[in-house]
Structures are given as structure tokens and as C-alpha cells.
């Protein structure tokens, strides 16, 4: 509701359309599941027998599914009567055939191998490609896993709360390593005390059962923190860049070709998920020009500590489908906030120039904004660290 009030203030000038497109991700995947179920049930009521759920929406065009949860929230603001929220998943975009341009938006979770776990497992068992070729396959294989882990488990009473604490622990590489050690100790201790199995027994080549258990836990729980969200000094690692290249060149390219007949000459790709804003260009197989890649960062900073690469940006898209990143803030470095600014992917565009001039003209207001954000970051960070340390210590003691 705070976001609605900010973008649609009562009595204020309406700048944005009341036809809202909502692109769901991992934390809110269940909103997409609700839309799927509603579509299926409606078809049955109308006398049809659908073969399966509708796993994905088209990238282009207005999504046909409505997000009833978001529309229910908007109903709390009577001045927005008649507003609609259309839900898209996992991508949504705009294409201009005449200019040969397209902008595609994705939350970003499918760029992270953790959210493709079932595809990875299936590929391992079958000895096949770990990464699906189409969006439909990607969601068919991994949607239930995402819905369970990020939606259903969170509503599982006390254990759901503990899962949330574990998630926060996993965002810290150091804390997750300690937690992984504690879990491994508990597993090996239980094998010995309850089943009489000596964890020091050698299996092969000098490797003990204890070694295997510790390795397995570290590769899952421990290394989970060493993915996209954990890097202190960089926005993406080599594996993540490779994953972006796969996503753009394989499932996304296949869907764009299916809908448009061919890949647009210029493509801009916008995602979030990592909470680390950046903008750049990436050479991708199949695309005539390097793809502009923009990350929005995250409005909510939920790490247990501050990182200079963590922050937030708002994406501006022009009628000509140019994209510019309004870099709102990053975590302070040496207690200094970087100024609000506009940046592009490296290519000169009219939108970047005009938006930069507008920010400069209102620099005094943006400085006030930066000061307010700085104060809020520091105050919330202190509360978050204290809460995190208290809960993680409780969990460590329970594991031991």
C-alpha cells in the first residue's frame, strides 16, 4: 500500500496508467500459482477440460490473467476504483517491430541455479543438459519447487519462521559456513548414537563417511550463500554471467522468436533478484547487437551486513524503448552515500541525457533523499544485525 500511495497519491496528478503489469518472481510465485489455478477452474466451469496448467505467459502483449491479490489491496484506495493488475510470468516485455527493439523484464530467479534445482537434478540423473531449452520446460520442472520453498514453506507456522531465519543465515557466507558445520556435526553424531554407524569409517580412496556428509552439506547449505546474493565486492560472478548468457540465448530467445518471428535487433534485459544494481552490455549468441543488461537492485535490504554493491535503482523506459537506470542508492562506503545519478548500458541514448539533466536540475531534492535513505539504512542495519545474531546463535545451539 505504501508503494500504491507513492505512485498514485490521492488528489495528486496521475502520472502512471491504472492498467498495471505485475511480473512475479520467486518470493511471490504463489500469486502466479493462484492465477494458474483460477484459469484452470474457470475453464472447467465453462465446460472445458484443460490438459494442464498454463505454465507461462507471453512476453509481449497485455497479460490475460489478473492478479486478484494485488487488486484486493488496491481496493483499499477508493480513488483507484477501476484499476487492474495483470500478472505475467516469468517474463514480460514490449517490442517495437518497426524499430527492431524490445525490452524484456524478468525477476531474475531463473538466472540463479538454486531455482533450477529440479532441472539440475533431472539432468544429473539422465546425464543430459542441466538447463532447459524453453521457458515452458523451465517452469514445468521448477515451478513446484519454487512455490514450495518460497511460498508454502513460509506459511508453515513455526517451522516456516525458522525457514525464514535459515534463509537470512544463508545470505551471509560466514554465517552459512558455521551453520553448515553445525548441521554436519548433528548428522554424523546422530548416525553414530542412533544407528551405530561410525562416521570415521572409510568408504573409498581414504574418504570417510564424515568427509562425504560434510561435503554434501557444504555444497548445498554452505555454498547456497556463495551465489548471486553473496559477493561483497562484485555484482556478478563468472557462473552468473554464463547463466545470463544461457537464459538470453536459449529459453528467452526461443520465446521471442516464437512470438515475433525473429529476434529484435536491439534488446534490453531488465532483472532484479540479486539486490545489486548495475548496467552493462553482454554479447550473446544469436543477437545482432550486444544485449543491454540492467539490474534494479532491491528496494528492501535484507542482508545481515552492509555491502557497497548492494542497493536500488529504478528503470526508465522511453517510448523509443531506450532504457536508463536511475541509480537511487547503494549501501554507504566509509559512511558516504553515492549521489543519485542516471546511467546507461554504455551506449549513448537520448533518454540517458534527458534523465541526467532532470536529476541535475533537482539535485537539492535528491540530496535530501540520499540523506533520508542513509539514516534509514544505518538504523535498520543495526536492528537487523542484532536480530540476526540472536536468532542464529539460538539455531547454532539447537543444532549442536
Image: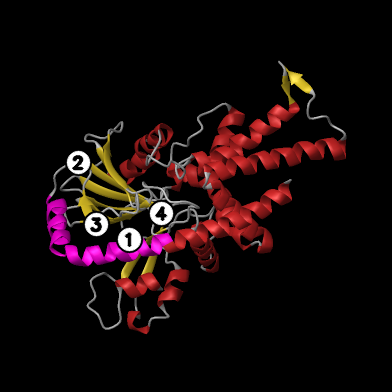
Residue 308 showing in the rendered view: yes
The residue that appears at 78% across and 30% down in the rendered structure is: 199
* Pointer 2 residue: 346
Q: Position of 359 compared to 187: left or right? A: left
Q: Position of 230 compared to 205: left or right? A: left
Circles 4, 1 touching at the beta carbon (< 8 Å): no
Q: Position of 242 compared to 336: left or right? A: right
Q: Position of residue 379 (x, y in %)?
A: 44, 63
* Pointer 1 residue: 62
Of the numbered discs in the image, which one, if any, rests on residue 340? 3
Q: Position of residue 305 (x, y in %)?
A: 47, 51
What is the distance, in whole Å, between disc 2 and disc 1 at their CAs? 30 Å
Q: Which comes sooner in the sequence, label 4 or label 1? A: 4
Number of other residues with Cα within 10 Å of mark 2, as a class: few under 14, some 14 to 19, many 20 or more: few
What is the distance, in whole Å, between disc 1 and disc 3 at their CAs? 32 Å
Quadrant of the frame with the N terminus: bottom left
What is the distance, in whole Å, between disc 3 and disc 2 at their CAs? 18 Å
The residue that appears at 59% across and 56% down in the rendered structure is: 164
Amino acid at each position: 500500500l505504501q508503494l500504491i500511495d507513492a505512485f498514485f497519491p490521492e488528489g495528486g496528478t496521475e502520472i502512471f496508467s491504472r492498467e498495471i503489469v505485475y511480473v512475479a518472481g520467486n518470493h511471490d510465485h504463489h500469486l502466479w500459482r493462484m492465477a494458474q489455478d483460477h484459469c484452470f477452474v474457470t475453464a472447467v466451469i465453462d465446460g472445458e477440460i484443460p490438459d494442464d496448467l498454463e505454465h507461462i505467459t507471453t512476453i509481449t502483449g497485455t497479460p490475460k490473467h489478473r492478479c486478484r491479490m494485488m487488486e484486493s489491496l488496491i481496493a483499499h484506495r477508493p480513488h483507484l476504483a477501476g484499476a487492474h493488475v495483470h500478472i505475467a510470468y516469468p517474463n514480460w516485455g514490449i517490442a517495437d517491430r518497426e524499430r527492431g527493439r524490445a525490452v524484456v523484464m524478468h525477476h531474475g530467479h531463473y538466472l540463479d541455479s538454486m531455482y533450477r534445482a529440479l532441472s539440475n537434478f533431472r539432468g544429473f540423473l539422465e546425464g543430459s543438459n542441466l538447463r532447459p531449452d524453453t521457458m515452458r520446460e523451465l517452469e514445468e520442472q521448477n515451478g513446484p519447487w519454487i512455490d514450495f520453498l518460497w511460498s508454502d514453506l513460509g506459511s508453515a507456522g513455526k517451522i516456516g519462521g525458522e525457514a525464514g531465519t535459515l534463509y537470512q543465515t544463508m545470505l551471509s557466507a560466514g554465517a552459512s559456513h558455521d551453520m553448515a558445520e553445525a548441521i554436519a556435526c548433528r548428522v554424523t553424531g546422530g548416525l553414530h548414537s542412533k544407528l551405530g554407524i561410525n562416521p570415521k569409517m572409510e568408504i573409498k580412496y581414504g574418504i570417510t563417511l564424515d568427509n562425504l556428509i560434510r561435503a554434501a552439506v557444504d555444497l548445498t547449505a554452505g555454498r547456497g550463500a556463495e551465489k548471486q546474493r553473496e559477493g561483497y565486492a562484485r555484482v556478478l560472478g563468472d557462473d552468473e554471467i554464463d547463466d545470463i548468457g544461457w537464459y538470453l540465448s536459449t529459453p528467452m530467445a526461443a520465446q521471442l522468436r516464437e512470438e515475433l518471428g525473429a529476434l529484435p535487433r536491439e534488446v534490453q534485459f531488465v532483472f532484479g533478484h540479486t539486490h545489486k544494481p548495475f548496467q552493462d552490455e553482454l554479447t550473446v549468441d544469436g543477437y545482432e547487437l550486444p544485449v543491454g543488461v540492467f539490474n534494479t537492485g532491491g528496494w528492501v535490504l535484507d542482508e545481515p551486513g552492509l555491502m557497497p554493491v548492494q542497493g536500488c535503482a529504478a528503470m526508465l523506459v522511453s517510448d523509443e524503448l531506450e532504457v536508463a537506470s536511475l541509480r537511487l542508492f547503494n549501501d554507504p562506503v566509509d559512511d558516504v552515500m553515492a549521489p543519485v545519478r542516471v546511467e546507461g548500458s554504455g551506449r549513448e541514448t537520448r533518454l540517458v541525457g534527458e534523465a541526467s539533466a532532470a536529476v541535475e536540475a533537482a539535485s537539492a531534492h535528491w540530496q535530501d533523499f540520499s540523506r533520508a535513505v542513509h539514516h534509514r539504512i544505518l538504523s535498520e542495519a543495526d536492528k537487523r544485525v542484532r536480530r540476526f545474531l540472536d536468532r542464529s546463535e539460538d539455531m547454532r545451539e539447537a543444532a549442536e
